């Protein structure tokens, strides 16, 4: 089925109210002579080597029939007239086919423009004794062929755009592979930015694979996503929601500290989504939720110094003991390095011991709340232990209720609380 051909503007206003196009009648009488000269002209220009000579001649012969077809009228030079619809449709198909064959726009338009030389030679011979009629017919033929040549270039460009769009769609499909990590566990690694078009393909591809495999858990890994803005986060949430509607659970992995901080600052709510720092951590959770057991070696303690605030790794948890007065730069450094350690170690919980703190201000309180929120986005729960009564009163008076942060009286109770939360999630 031939696509509709858009209207194109005339190159110049019509100069005659009733155009007597003798040059088209001449084409009918001298058809074979013009056809031979036209084909020879195109072959001489060397732009049609990839076309079989018989096909080129058949195209030229068909176009001559279409060119001589419309009856003379006031609008005979207007290629937007309905009488020219067959010729326009023919040129549209020819332009698209040559675009797919790798022809350039000028090479495609030369199909029409190459007709000028043999036609003008015929006109000079026919009207050698009538200069005025020769000039009129040459002008009419030039205007008509120029409009038709312009049409071929526009259709060529439209055909190239269709090829580019098709290739872009294919590349988007190739850039969103859905992998089977285990029975019932799928992984979708994303690389590059997420926009509306790509999100739609991501959802369709993932949901189709869920239907085909009957998977119960899908992991979306965004390690290769350079930045996350509000729109990207919303696209991820749409994918998670669609996955849940299909009866599968979705886990987002690859959330780096910088992305966690961005999500917190943007105020994007990922509290209802399971998130992990690495694909390995997400896969471990997926196996556990599908009834498989993942064993770890015996816990060891490893010290990582962050200026004067130590961070101690205890198995799958981190212990932060604040024994000095907090100031702004130290709090920001602790926030940065703690999230780095969570991502590096794949920690599932954080204990923050503030028993030595006797006073806090609003900035320190917000930093503690933001740090806990970032840890939760990275897949680690936070328990605040050892809070002094004066600190608790100050936080309440400042309006900092620390939502989402668990609290306990001491480290032992905090470890027990983390263990309980981990078991409930598993």
Image: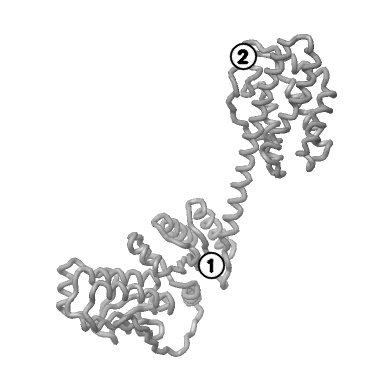
Left or right position of 420 against 122: left
Instruction: Give the residue number, with chain letter if any, for mark 2.
Output: 15
Image height of 237 relative to 418, above or below:
above
Position of the C terminus, as image quadrant, is bottom left
Q: Nearer the viewer, residue 319 or 235?
A: 319
**Count of numbered labels shown in the rendering:** 2
The answer, for residue 393, to whether it is visible in the render is: yes
The answer, for residue 290, to whether it is visible in the render is: no
Circle 1 SS class: strand
Nearest to viewer (mark 1 / mark 2): 2
> Distance of mark 1 from mark 2, alpha carbons?
68 Å
Image height of 170 relative to 388, above or below:
above
Query: How busy is the neighbourhood of tag 2: few (under 14 within 10 Å), some, or many (20 plus)?
Result: few
Say which residue appears at 66% left-offset and 38% top-offset: 105
Left or right position of 199 against 339: right
Instruction: Give the residue number, with chain letter if any, for mark 1.
Output: 187
Q: Which numbered disc, 1 or 2, marks the residue that appears first in the sequence?
A: 2
**Image location (x, y in percent) of residue 341:** 39, 78
Query: How busy is the neighbourhood of tag 1: few (under 14 within 10 Å), some, or many (20 plus)?
Result: many
């Amino acid at each position: 089925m031939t696509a509709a051909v858009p209207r194109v503007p005339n190159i110049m206003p019509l100069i005659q109210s009733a155009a007597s196009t003798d040059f088209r009648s001449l084409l009918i009488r001298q058809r074979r002579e013009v056809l031979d000269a036209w084909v020879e002209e195109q072959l001489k220009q060397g732009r049609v080597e990839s076309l079989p000579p018989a096909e080129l001649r058949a195209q030229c012969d068909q176009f001559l029939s279409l060119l001589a077809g419309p009856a003379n009228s006031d609008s005979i030079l207007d290629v937007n007239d309905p009488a020219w619809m067959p010729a326009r449709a023919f040129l549209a198909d020819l332009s698209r086919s040559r675009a797919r064959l790798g022809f350039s726009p000028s090479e495609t338009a030369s199909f029409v423009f190459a007709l000028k030389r043999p036609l003008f030679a015929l006109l000079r011979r026919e009207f050698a004794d009538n200069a005025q009629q020769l000039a009129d017919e040459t002008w009419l033929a030039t205007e008509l062929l120029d409009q038709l040549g312009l049409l071929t270039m526009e259709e060529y460009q439209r055909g190239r755009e269709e090829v580019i769009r098709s290739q872009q769609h294919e590349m988007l499909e190739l850039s969103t592979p859905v992998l089977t990590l285990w029975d019932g566990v799928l992984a979708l690694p994303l690389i590059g930015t997420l926009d509306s078009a790509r999100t739609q393909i991501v959802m369709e591809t993932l949901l189709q694979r869920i239907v085909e495999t009957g998977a119960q858990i899908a992991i979306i890994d965004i390690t290769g996503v350079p930045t996350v803005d509000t729109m990207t986060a919303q696209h991820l949430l749409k994918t998670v929601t669609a996955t849940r509607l299909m009866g599968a659970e979705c886990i987002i992995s690859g959330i780096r500290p910088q992305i966690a901080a961005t999500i917190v600052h943007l105020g994007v709510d990922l509290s209802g989504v399971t998130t992990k720092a690495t694909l390995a951590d997400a896969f471990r959770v997926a196996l556990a939720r599908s009834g498989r057991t993942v064993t770890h070696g015996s816990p060891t303690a490893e010290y990582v110094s962050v200026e004067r605030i130590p961070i101690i790794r205890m198995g799958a948890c981190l212990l932060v003991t604040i024994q000095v007065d907090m100031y702004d730069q130290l709090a920001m450094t602790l926030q940065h390095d703690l999230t780095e350690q969570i991502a590096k170690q794949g920690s599932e919980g954080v204990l923050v011991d503030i028993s030595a703190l006797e006073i806090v201000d609003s900035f320190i309180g917000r930093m503690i709340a933001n740090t806990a929120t970032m840890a939760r986005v990275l897949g680690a729960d936070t328990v605040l232990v050892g809070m002094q009564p004066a600190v608790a009163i100050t936080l309440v008076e400042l309006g900092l209720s620390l939502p989402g942060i668990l609290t306990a009286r001491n480290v032992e109770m905090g470890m027990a609380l983390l263990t309980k939360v981990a078991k409930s999630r598993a």
